[in-house]
C-alpha cells in the first residue's frame, strides 16, 4: 500500500493544500493498493504561478539548451523503464506486452522531440516579412489513464522543445505511475517551475487550469465529452486548445485481402490495450460475400486470445481499468444484444476463473448495423462490431458515417487499392495492412475526435504563436 501525498511545484515535492484523498485500486484484484492526496484550486494556482515565473527565462532558451534538457529527461526516464512497466501493470492493468511498447514510446518521445527541434526554423521569411514562432505561454496539460506516462512525456517533450512551461494534471487514477515518472523527471535537473504536476480531480484541478487567465493553452487527451467542456471553458480567456479525443474507427477489409493475416491484425487492432485505446479499430467492415469465412476466422482468433493476469507474458487482454469501466463495457454488450446484433463470441459476465478483477470476455458482434449504438458510441473495451457491405462505395459510406474521425484502417492485397480507399476515409490517420505508428507524423482527429495535431512539426507548432514582423 503506497501513499502519494506530494505534488510537484517549482522544482520541489510539496504537500498539497487539498486534503481529500482518492483510493487506488488494482484492476486485477480490486484490492486497494494505494492512496493519493488530491490537490485543489489553490494548489493549481500555485503551480500556475511557478510556471509563469519560469516562463520568461525558459522561453528565451536556445535550441541547443532545450535539446540538452530533453536529453537529460530522456536519460533519467529511461533508467526507470522497468519500474514504469511494473507500475503500469499494477495500477492500470496494462498487459505486459502493451506496457512494454507504451513505455518504450514514452521514452522515445524525448528523442523524437529532439529530432523535430533540430530541423525546426523558429524564424522564417514569409512573403516579405519576418515570421517568428514564439512560445505560446504557460500550457495546461490534462491526460487520461490509458497510457499515462506516454501522454505526459509526449506533451511535456513538445512543450520543452517549444520553450513553453507547463502545469500537468494527470488522471487521478494514475497517481502511482505519475509518481515513478515524476521522480525521474525531477532527477533530470531542469530549472524550477518549467514543469509542475498537480494530482487532482478533473472538475477541480482541470477546471482551474481551463479557466485561469495565466494559462495560454490547454493540451488535452481524453473523452470527447470532457474535451467539449474544456473547449467551452477555455474560450472565455481565448486559450489555444489541442484536443485528442475519442474514436470509433473503421477497418475496411477489401475482398482481395489475405484473411489469414488480415483477421488476426483486425482483432489485434480492435483489442489493443485491452480495447481501452482511442485508436482501436472497433468497426470491422467486411464484404458480404466473405462474411461467413470472416466469422469463422474471427471466432477462432478471439477464442485463442489469452485473457487474464496482465503481468503474464502471453496475456493479450487484461482487466478494465476500474469497476465503473467494467460496468460500462457490460452495459454495451447487453445493449448490443437488445439492439439485435448477433453475438459471435464473448458476451456478458466475467471469463471463468477471473471473477476477482475487472475482466471482460473479448466480444464480437456480427450483423451489426451502423445505426446501432454499439456501432456509433465509443465503448472503450474489447468489443468488436462486424458490419457487412455490398461494394466499396457502401464500405466508405459506412466508414465515414460516424461523429468521430481519429483513425481508419484498410486491409488489401493491393497497395494501390488500399491507398485509394485510405484517401477517402475521413480520419486523421489511416493505417494500411496493420497497426502502425510514426512518431514524427501528425496525430489527431477529424470531426469530434479532436482539434489540432500532436507529434513532429505539427505538434510543435501548436505550442507556438507566429508573430509577423514587417520591415
Ligand atoms: P476523461 O475525459 O474522463 O478524463 C481525461 C482527463 O480529463 C482526466 O485527467 C480527468 O481528470 C480530466 N477531466 C475530467 N473532467 C474534467 C473537467 N471538467 N475539466 C478539466 N479536466 C477534466 O477520459 P478518460 O476516461 O480518462 O480516458 C478515456 C478517454 O480518452 C476515451 O474517450 C479515449 O478515447 C480518450 N483518449 C483519446 C486519445 C487520443 O489521443 N485521441 C488517447 C487516449 C484516450
Image (cartoon, rainbow, N blue to C red):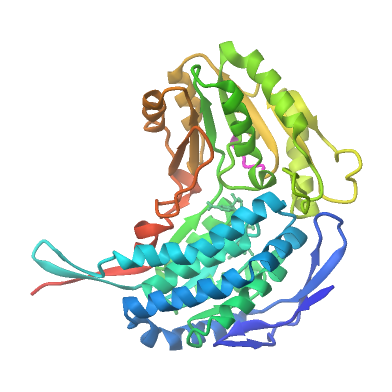
Q: From the viewer's perspective, is residue 309 above or below residue 400?
A: below
| 38 with respect to 116 (left or right) | right
Q: Is residue 158 left or right of residue 14?
A: left
**Residue 463: image x %, image y %?**
38, 67
* Quarter the N terminus occupies: bottom right
Between 172 and 454, the residue placed more toward the observer is 454
Residue 339 at least partly seen: no
Given residues 2 and 312, the one toward you in this image is: 312
Give residue 188's quadrant in the image.
Answer: bottom right
Q: Is residue 130 left or right of residue 232?
A: left
Q: Which residues are magenta?
A: 375-379
> What percent of the width, then of the height, locates residue 419?
38, 30
User: Foreground: 354 or 316?
Assistant: 316
Q: Is residue 378 magenta?
A: yes
Q: Residue at x 43, y 74 (%)?
A: 160
For the question of whether residue 307 can be seen, the reply is: yes
Position in image of residue 154 (x %, y %) = 50, 63
Residue at (86, 38) in percent of width and height: 351
Q: Residue furthest top?
A: 289
The answer to which image quadrant residue 418 occupies is top left
Please check the rendered image and state whether residue 354 is part of the magenta-colored stretch, yes or no: no
Q: Who's the residue at 38% across and 58% down the image?
A: 456
Q: Is residue 145 above or below residue 273?
A: below
User: Where is the C terminus found, in terms of image quarters?
Assistant: bottom left
Q: Principal SS element in the magenta part?
A: loop
Q: Ligand 1 appears in which quadrant?
A: bottom right
Identify the residue shown where x is 79% and y is 41%: 307
> Looking at the picture, does residue 436 appear above or below residue 4?
above
As rendered, which of 281 and 49 lies closer to the eye? 281
Amino acid at each position: 500500500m503506497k501513499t502519494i501525498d506530494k505534488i510537484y511545484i517549482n522544482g520541489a515535492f510539496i504537500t498539497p493544500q487539498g486534503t481529500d484523498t482518492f483510493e487506488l485500486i488494482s484492476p486485477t484484484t480490486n484490492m486497494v493498493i494505494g492512496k493519493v492526496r488530491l490537490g485543489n484550486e489553490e494548489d493549481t494556482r500555485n503551480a500556475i504561478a511557478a510556471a509563469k515565473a519560469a516562463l520568461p527565462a525558459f522561453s528565451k532558451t536556445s535550441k541547443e539548451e532545450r535539446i540538452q534538457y530533453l536529453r537529460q529527461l530522456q536519460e533519467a526516464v529511461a533508467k526507470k523503464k522497468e519500474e514504469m512497466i511494473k507500475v503500469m501493470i499494477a495500477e492500470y492493468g496494462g498487459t505486459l506486452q502493451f506496457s512494454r511498447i507504451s513505455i518504450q514510446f514514452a521514452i522515445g518521445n524525448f528523442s523524437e522531440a529532439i529530432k523535430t527541434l533540430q530541423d525546426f526554423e523558429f524564424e522564417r521569411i514569409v512573403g516579405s516579412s519576418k515570421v517568428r514562432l514564439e512560445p505560446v505561454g504557460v500550457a495546461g496539460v490534462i491526460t487520461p489513464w490509458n497510457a499515462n506516462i506516454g501522454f505526459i512525456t509526449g506533451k511535456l517533450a513538445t512543450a520543452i522543445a517549444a520553450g513553453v512551461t507547463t502545469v500537468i494534471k494527470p488522471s487521478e487514477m494514475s497517481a502511482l505511475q505519475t509518481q515513478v515518472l515524476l521522480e525521474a523527471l525531477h532527477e533530470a535537473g531542469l530549472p524550477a517551475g518549467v514543469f509542475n504536476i498537480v494530482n487532482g480531480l478533473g472538475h477541480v484541478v482541470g477546471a482551474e487550469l481551463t479557466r485561469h487567465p495565466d494559462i495560454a493553452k490547454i493540451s488535452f487527451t481524453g473523452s470527447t465529452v470532457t474535451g467539449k467542456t474544456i473547449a467551452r471553458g477555455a474560450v472565455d480567456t481565448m486559450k489555444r486548445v489541442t484536443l485528442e479525443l475519442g474514436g470509433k474507427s473503421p477497418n475496411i477489409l477489401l475482398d482481395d485481402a489475405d484473411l489469414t493475416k488480415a483477421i488476426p491484425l483486425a482483432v489485434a487492432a480492435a483489442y489493443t490495450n485491452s480495447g481501452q485505446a482511442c485508436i482501436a479499430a472497433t468497426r470491422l467492415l467486411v464484404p458480404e460475400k466473405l462474411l461467413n469465412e470472416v466469422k469463422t476466422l474471427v471466432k477462432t482468433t478471439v477464442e485463442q486470445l489469452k485473457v487474464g493476469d496482465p503481468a503474464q507474458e502471453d496475456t493479450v487482454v487484461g482487466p478494465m481499468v476500474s469497476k465503473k469501466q467494467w460496468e460500462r463495457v457490460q452495459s454495451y454488450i447487453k445493449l448490443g444484444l437488445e439492439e439485435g446484433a448477433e453475438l459471435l463470441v464473448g458476451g456478458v459476465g466475467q471469463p471463468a476463473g477471473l471473477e476477482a478483477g475487472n475482466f471482460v470476455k473479448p466480444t464480437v458482434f456480427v450483423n451489426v448495423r451502423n445505426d446501432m449504438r454499439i456501432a456509433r458510441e465509443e465503448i472503450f473495451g474489447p468489443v468488436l462490431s462486424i458490419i457487412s457491405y455490398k461494394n466499396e462505395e457502401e464500405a466508405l459510406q459506412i466508414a465515414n458515417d460516424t461523429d468521430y474521425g481519429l483513425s481508419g484502417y484498410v486491409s488489401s492485397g493491393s497497395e494501390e487499392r488500399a491507398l485509394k480507399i485510405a484517401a477517402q476515409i475521413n480520419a486523421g490517420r489511416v493505417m494500411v495492412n496493420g497497426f502502425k505508428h510514426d512518431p514524427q507524423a501528425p496525430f489527431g482527429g477529424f470531426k469530434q475526435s479532436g482539434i489540432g495535431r500532436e507529434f513532429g512539426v505539427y505538434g510543435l507548432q501548436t505550442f507556438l504563436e507566429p508573430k509577423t514582423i514587417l520591415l
